[in-house]
Image: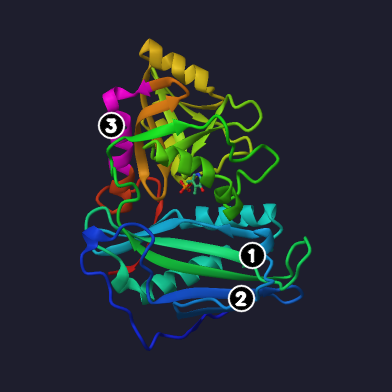
Amino acid sequence: MTIRVEKTQHPKEKPVDHNQLGFGDIFTDHMFLMNYKEGQGWYDPRIVPYGPLSLDPAAMILHYAQEVFEGMKAYCGEDGVVRLFRPQENFKRLNSSNEHVCIPPVDEELLLDALKQLIILDKDWIPTAPNTSLYIRPFIIATDAHLGVRPSHEYLLAIILSPVGVYYKEGLNPVKIYVETKYVRAVRGGLGMCKTSGNYAASLKAQVVANDQNYTQVLWLDGVERKYIEEVGTMNVFFKLGDEIVTPELRGSILPGITRKSAIELLRHWGYKVSERLISIEEVAQAAKNGELVEAFGTGTAAVISPIGHLKWGDDIMEINSGAIGPVSQKLYDTLTGIQWGRQRDPFGWMVEVCEK
Ligand SMILES: *Cc1c(COP(=O)(O)O)cnc(C)c1O
């Protein structure tokens, strides 16, 4: 399939101050679109001017949330080369999410090719200030005009681009996390492992309650016993207990993060003992009392590594590493961002070159 390109006649003003970008408010001049119709498959891949989508008010996405999305980034290196971080992993996960919500699979190679073309066309939007990048949001929505629950027969896939700065205003300063004991995000057998909008709808109430108490994010516990740790809002989570680095195993209720996978690979490469296993909040609280909880951090594309300095579980307040970033979090952050911005060798072949800026 060849990708049709329609360039904008009205380029927008680009942000001037790359240090004031924030996250997710500014979008580039173009977007990628592609449609699906049962019997025809995916068709009409195209790059067109960025703008509103037209949807029938009965479009099934609006009523039954049949949707999947991805989040990834392109980085402009100090050498002027634009690179993607493990993009094949994102498109593989997109298809895995598709499978769970009955959306037909997409051609992963076509998407990577489309994404590269889109980035090249909008490359003047890629920010270059330290810690800035081009956030990439692919998503698919059910567009059948139909009321009544069943998988849609038609879909729209889109990729939009947003120049971004840091995700948390804290930057690399440790965040405060609220352990959620009332609400749950997902249960095994549900869609927790799937990057789908409904999981976020389910998370908003808890996040607002946590934000009102001055906490940045919630730490979810398992939906059945409220005992085992799952993940943090938009991040997977790791704890260093003595010499062991523990992260919850993938049991079907948490998102299999690509940053999580990369962190595990790096830590093992450095010789750390990493366990993917069940870990209860009680175990963490006990380790905090014994002085064995030496570090905690979240991993995700948006913030890369986000150290956790403070955990509140009911009346139990845990201060971790005196609220400062720990050496493992720092080393992971330096290495991952070093590879992503091309400052450091890429021993695992994670980066995919797109173009020269
Ligand atoms: C996207 C996401 C993550 C992080 O995944 P990465 O691939 O590392 O960006 C973690 N948890 C949830 C719920 C997510 O949606």
Q: CA distance from mark 3 to mark 2?
A: 46 Å
Q: Position of residue 51 (x, y in %)?
A: 46, 78
Q: Position of residue 257 (x, y in %)?
A: 50, 44
Q: Which is more N-terminal, label 1 or label 3? A: 1
Q: What secondary structure is the magenta-colored segment mainly?
A: helix
Instruction: Kindly identify which numbered label has been placed on residue 62.
Output: 1
Q: Residues within 10 Å of mark 2 (few under 14, many from 20)?
A: few
Residue at horizontal 28%, vertical 73%?
A: 14
- In the picture, the quarter occupied by the C terminus is bottom left
The amino acid type of the residue labelled 1 equals Leu
Single out the mark in the foreground, 3 or 2.
Answer: 2
According to the image, label 2 marks what residue? 55
Q: Residues within 10 Å of mark 1 (few under 14, many from 20)?
A: some
Nearer-N-terminus badge (3/2): 2
Q: Residue furthest top?
A: 290
Say if mark 1 contacts mark 2, CB within 8 Å: yes
Q: CA distance from mark 1 to mark 2?
A: 9 Å
Residue 280 appears at what percent x and percent y? 54, 22
Residue 79 seen in the figure: no
Residue 263 vertical placement versus 246 (above, below): below
Looking at the rendering, the stretch of residues picked out in magenta corresponds to 318-335
SS at circle 2? loop
